[in-house]
Image (tube, grey):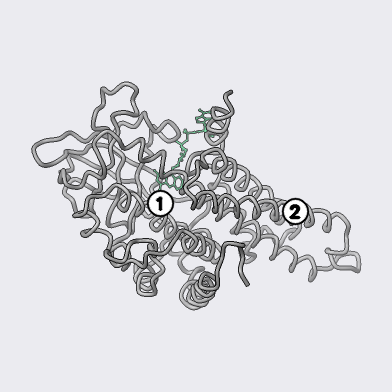
Amino acid sequence: MARYRFEEEEHTMFRKSLRKFLEKEAVPQYDQWEKDRLIPKSFWRKLGEMGFLCPQVEEQYGGLGLDFRYGVIIGEEMERVGASLTGVGLHNDITVPYIEAYGTEQQKQEWLPGCISGEYITAIAMTEPGAGSDLANISATAVKEGDHYIVNGQKTFITNGINSTHVLVVVKTDPKAEPKHKGISLLMIEEGTPGFTKGRKLDKVGLHAQDTSELYFEDCKVPAANLVGEENKGFTYLMEKLQQERLVVALAAQIASEDMLEMTVDYVKSRKAFGKPISAFQNTQFKLVEMATEIELGKAFLESLIEEHMAGKDVVSKVSMAKYWLTETAKKISGECMQLHGGYGYMEEYKIARRYRDIPVAAIYAGSNEIMKTIIAKRMGL
Ligand SMILES: Cc1cc2nc3c(=O)[nH]c(=O)nc-3n(C[C@H](O)[C@H](O)[C@H](O)COP(=O)(O)OP(=O)(O)OC[C@H]3O[C@@H](n4cnc5c(N)ncnc54)[C@H](O)[C@@H]3O)c2cc1C
């Protein structure tokens, strides 16, 4: 059955086949990946073989030329398995679109086929130890010397950091620019480039299988041909593409909420106290009804937002609203669902415990929820 009104039969079939694939290739392995703190590259290759990586890319570069509705389905089905699969959505819907939109013909031919097959895994490196929300204030520099840039700096909290073969690095090409954001550019730095080293795999509260890491650049010599888009226009590109990133995070939060509600409904029906199922208590019912209502509201909001985004409308305010509201809602739901599980909810063998650990970061990354509110406030003329 279609999940959204804009889903056609082929989308529903695509969702079905992806879900079947994940039930075989991801669900049974997921616990082990969480223990290993890594999703193996072989899984990426399998995704590529099945056409689940970057299906939106034009056929001439090896893609399927499919629309964003397929991206929505991939993001949702990955999240259904577990939040640590977020790196796939980041590759498909966040990093690769920069190459598609701003890359040269040569860059597209060189990089896109590998991104589709799973041979290449991408990451985007904006955040630094000293600058996250205040992106214009980054200090990594790229100084042009002949036909190369010499890059120096450090990045942190980078999703896909360890597995990545291609990192789109946000650098200062004009450190003196005023305002500061006018001196920012995007450089694709490939694994193995001298002077580029990967740091620690970071030990996180949740998203355990996600290989978030630090990256270091020390006199790293990057071909000038790896500049993506025009020099000093990086910030403009980021502001445009961050909309889809935030939408993808909102979608994942919605799926997390739905999953938590479903598992909690099942649990309260089977657990008994005072001679009756927990689900018979009015408090339980009211809590679950409130969650179900918020979930329905979230889904309706997302449905219209995806349509507006696909129609190319200005969705900056609404995307920021969706990102902040849906992630806050999911956080709240995670606490309430854990409470309804009683002590078992605090045990690792119950899925709610993992969801509870995984969800808070959604309020922090892709632009924190406070930053979302500053964007909305500005657009309200405040
Ligand atoms: C698991 C994980 C994965 C990540 N993946 C990536 C990635 O792939 N690539 C990447 O580049 N980054 C990534 N990040 C980094 C993430 O985007 C940043 O952590 C986030 O933008 C916040 O920046 P910060 O950590 O420096 O916090 P800070 O900017 O120091 O913020 C600290 C607090 O102050 C608040 N604050 C800051 N400015 C304002 C303001 N103007 N008004 C009100 N409140 C404000 C923030 O909302 C926050 O609550 C990831 C982070 C995590 C945890």
Q: Secondary structure at mark 2?
A: helix
> In the shown orientation, is residue 288 left or right of residue 82?
right
**Considering the numbered disc 1 on the image, is that residue within a helix, a strand or a loop?**
helix
Q: Position of residue 348 (x, y in %)?
A: 61, 62
Q: Is residue 288 shown left or right of residue 147?
A: right
Q: Position of residue 228 (x, y in %)?
A: 25, 45
Q: Is residue 94 above or below residue 88?
A: above
User: In this view, which residue lies farthest toward the right?
Assistant: 275
Disc 2 residue crowd, few under 14, some 14–19, many 20+, Cα 10 Å: few
**Which residue is found at the position 28% from the left and 23% from the top?**
177
Where does label 1 land, which residue? 94
- Give the residue at x 73% y 59%: 343
| Residue 320 horizontal side relative to residue 190, left or right | right
Q: Amino acid at mark 2?
A: Thr
First along the sequence among labels 1 and 2: 1
Residue 42: image quadrant is bottom left
Q: Is residue 128 left or right of residue 192?
A: right
Q: CA distance from mark 1 to mark 2?
A: 30 Å
Query: Residue shown at 82%/57% (left/top)?
Result: 284
In the rendered image, the quadrant that contains the N terminus is bottom right
Residue extending farthest to the left is 146
Answer above or below: position of 337 versus 274: above
Q: Residues within 10 Å of mark 1 (few under 14, many from 20)?
A: many
Residue 161 visible (yes or no) = no
The answer to which of 282 and 197 lies nearer the viewer is: 282
Between 27 and 326, the one nearer to me in the picture: 326
User: Circle 2 sits on which residue?
Assistant: 293
* Residue type at tag 1: Ile
